[in-house]
Image (cartoon, rainbow, N blue to C red):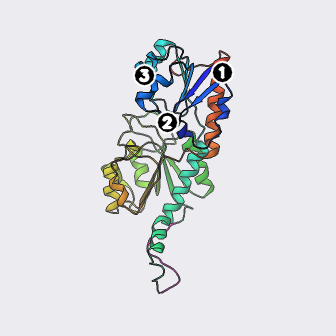
């Protein structure tokens, strides 16, 4: 069985033999759109993270039977087309819960202690020019007793909540506008915005959540509050966030995602010192990537044994 991995670079130093032992295994570091059809021509299984597979690509792959996505999201695959052709599609869920939760808590701690600003100040010589042993230029605050607002209370949101509670934070879970919930413990979205000292985003990007946080929402938040977003870039209006941060309407932000990735044209956020920006790495601990490959391996094995239920079936 021929297995082709189109974008191995997205898996970093993870052990690819985890899935490579399942058949004749061919890997490509990265695959440009014009290279896809040739590379998958004889493949029975295609493994991809972000490389797009649609009608044109599938037309060139007569033997294709399974597309194994090395992610939870699968918007890079035309599901209607795979269903029409009888090609199975699989993803892997919950592999990155610990990784993203750890990232979120780390960012909270860093921003609440203003570590990025103090690091920059020390390296610029400001501590060296101080007349006393310390440099109290930026505010710092404790996590204990602070209110953590969570938008998106799935596996990751719940794990972040567990970690935050262990650190003494008070948890408040938001109702997303337009969503219907059976439980009564969630608070109205606007109430959470007004109450939270820290707001964490853990919901998917959809038409309902696009620009969920913009000027109006940021104006509701406390002046010293912070936002952490390791979910999707389009959930926060970046121009509105840049304005709020530049004008100190909120205290800080940490973003692992941007509206455009990679940000070839830069961003107005890049010039600000009260925002942490990382290159979409919250999911990517070594352990997380290993769990991801183990999930892909299981999907391939289930496919071989005829027990796999694909997406959209």
In whole angstroms, how far apart are the C-alphas of marks 2 and 1? 27 Å
Residue receiving disc 1:
302
Front: mark 1 or 3: 3
Residue at 35% across, 60% down:
271
Comes first in the chain, label 3 or label 2 = 2
Question: Which badge, 1 or 3, comes first in the chain's sequence?
Answer: 3
Is 252 left or right of 298, judged from the image as shown? Answer: left
Q: Is residue 136 magenta?
A: yes
When asked about the image quadrant of residue 27, the answer is top right
Left or right position of 138 against 240? right
Mark nearest the camera among 2 and 1 is 2
- Secondary structure under the numbered disc 2 in the rendered image: loop
Is 155 on the left or on the right of 33, as rendered? right
Percent x, y of residue 195:
44, 55
How far apart in space, not on screen, are marks 1 and 3 (Cα)? 24 Å
Q: Label 2: which residue?
A: 30
How dense is the environment of label 2, judged by Cα within 10 Å: few (below 14), some, or many (20 and up)?
A: some
The stretch of residues the image draws in magenta is 131-141
Where residue 137 sits in the image (x, y, percent)?
43, 75
Residue identified by numbered label 3: 54
Assign the magenta stretch its main secondary structure.
Answer: loop
């Amino acid at each position: 069985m021929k297995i082709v991995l189109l974008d191995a670079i997205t898996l970093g130093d993870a052990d690819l033999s985890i899935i490579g032992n399942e058949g004749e295994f061919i890997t490509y570091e990265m695959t440009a759109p014009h290279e896809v059809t040739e590379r998958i021509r004889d493949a029975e299984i295609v493994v991809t993270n972000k490389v797009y597979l649609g009608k044109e690509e599938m037309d060139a792959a007569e033997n294709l039977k399974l597309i194994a996505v090395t992610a939870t999201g699968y918007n890079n695959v035309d599901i209607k087309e795979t269903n029409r052709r009888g090609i199975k599609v699989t993803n892997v869920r919950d592999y990155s819960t610990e990784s993203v939760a750890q990232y979120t808590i780390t960012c909270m701690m860093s921003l609440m202690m203003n570590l990025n600003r103090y690091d920059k100040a020390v390296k610029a010589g400001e501590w060296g020019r101080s007349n006393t042993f310390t440099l109290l230029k930026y505010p710092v605050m404790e996590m204990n007793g602070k209110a953590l607002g969570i938008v998106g209370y799935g596996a990751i949101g719940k794990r972040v909540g567990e970690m935050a509670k262990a650190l003494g934070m008070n948890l408040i879970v938001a109702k997303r506008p337009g969503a219907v919930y059976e439980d009564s413990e969630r608070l109205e979205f606007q109430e959470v915005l007004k109450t939270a000292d820290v707001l964490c985003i853990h919901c998917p990007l959809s038409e309902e959540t696009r620009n969920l946080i913009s000027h109006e929402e940021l104006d509701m938040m406390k002046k010293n509050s912070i936002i952490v977003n390791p979910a999707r870039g389009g959930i926060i209006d970046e121009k509105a966030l840049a304005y709020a941060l530049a004008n100190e309407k909120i205290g800080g932000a940490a973003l692992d995602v941007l509206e455009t990735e990679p940000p070839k044209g830069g961003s107005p956020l890049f010039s600000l010192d009260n925002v942490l920006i990382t290159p979409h790495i919250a999911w990517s601990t070594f352990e997380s990537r290993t769990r991801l490959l183990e999930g892909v391996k299981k999907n391939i094995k289930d496919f071989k044994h005829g027990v796999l239920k694909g997406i959209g079936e």
